[in-house]
Image (tube, rainbow, N blue to C red):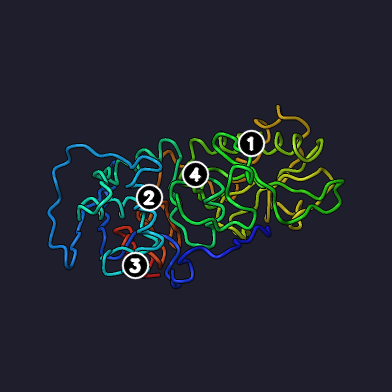
Amino acid sequence: LLLAVGGAVAGAAAWRSAPARGTAPGRTAILESTDTILIHDRLRTAGAGRFSAPQDNGCHEPVAGSDCDRNISWAKSQGILRHEDWYPGLSPYSSRRDFQEHLFRTKSPGGCPRPCPAAELRARALQTCDFEYNGGPTDLCFCQLAKNRGCANLPCACPQGCDAGAVWDGGRSVTFKNRAQALGCPQPVALLTIPKAYISNVKSLHTWCPSQMQALLQDMLFVGFQRYTAHVGPGPVHQCIHAATHVSMSWLHLHTFCGGGHVDNMPTSPDVAWCDTMDHPEQAAALAQRAAGWVDAFHGPRRPRAPRNCAEMGCDQSAPAHFCACNGKCQHFHDCCSDYQAKCQAR
C-alpha cells in the first residue's frame, strides 16, 4: 500500500511524537461496571478555576460547519500547538468531545453546547459501528477521505486532494485510487475501499463491531467491485484484505484490482491476506461470509459485546475513542482500563 500521506498538515510537525491515540492525560478516569463503562470527570483547569460537573440538562453534538465545529477543529489542530496553556489536560490527540467540553466549560466564544456523556457516545458507536478517528497524523489522509468527524475541518493531508472528486461515496464506505499500481493488468489502476468509521484493521473490526462485521465487509466488497467495473475495467477482479499483522496503514482497507493481477504482493498466503475473485456484484454476500470466516479463524469466536477491560481485550491493544485501552500508550493518555496494571504491566 503506497498511499502515503503527502503535503504539509498545518501544525502536524509540531504534534511532537506523542502516542497516536487516546484521550488526554489528567482528563478522565475510566471505570468499568457490569453493563457500561463510566467516565468520571476530574477536570482541574489551572487559570480557569475548578469546575464541578454541571447538571445534565441536555447535550448536543456540534452541527457540521457551525462556529463550535470550526472552533473545535482549530483548537485541536492549531490552537493547542500555539497556546498549550489554554488547553490544560488536553493534547492534539484528545477527542473532539474533550475539546468541546473544554470550550463549553470555559464558555469560550463560539457557543459550544454541552457534549453528550462519553458513555452515551460509546453506546451509540457500538450500536452503529461508527467510530470517531483517534489516531495520529500517519492515517490522517484516510480519515479525511472517509470524511470521519474525528478530522473534520483539518487541512488536507492527501496528495490527491480531499475534495469530492478524490473519492467515490458508497454509503458506509468510500473508494479511491490506490497510488500503488496493479501489475499484470490491462489497466494498472487499483482501488482501495475503506469504511467511513475508524476501524484500524480486521482485528479491530472483529473486536469492536462483531455483529456487523460481515455486513460491513459485504458492503465494501460490493462497492469496491461496482466502482472498479464502472471506472477502471470489467471483471473478474481480485478482492484482498491484509491480516492485522501485515498492514501498512492503520485503517481497514479492501484492495480491488484485475483478476490475474498483483498489488502489494497479493494474492498471497492467507496468513498475510485474504483474497478471492469476484465476477459479479451478487457474490458480495458469499465472499463476505468467507472473509468473516477467515477473520474468525485468526481471532476466535466473536464476542456478543465489546470488551470492557484488559482481561477481555488482551494486552497491547488500542481502543476506539471514549473507550479504555490496554497498551503502553494508555498511561500517557490516562485512559487505561482498571485492570491494566495487574493484567499487562505485571507480564
Q: Residue at x 39, y 63 (%)?
A: 78
Residue 102: horizontal and vertical position, in percent? 25, 55
Q: In the figure, residue 115 lies in which quadrant?
A: top left
Q: Which amino acid, by three-letter code, is at mark 1?
A: Ala
Element at badge 2? Answer: helix
Disc on the earlier residue, 4 or 3: 4
Disc on the earlier residue, 4 or 2: 2
Label 3: which residue? 331
Label 1: which residue? 288
Using a 10 Å C-alpha cutoff, classify the residue at mark 3 as few (fewer than 14 neighbours), some (14 to 19) or many (20 or more): some
Element at badge 1? Answer: helix
Q: CA distance from mark 2 to mark 1?
A: 38 Å
Q: Nearer the viewer, residue 241 or 340?
A: 241
Residue 73: horizontal and vertical position, in percent? 39, 54
Residue 234: horizontal and vertical position, in percent? 82, 35
Residue 70 - label: 2
- In the image, which is nearer the foreground, mark 4 or mark 2? 2
- In the image, which is nearer the foreground, mark 4 or mark 1? 4
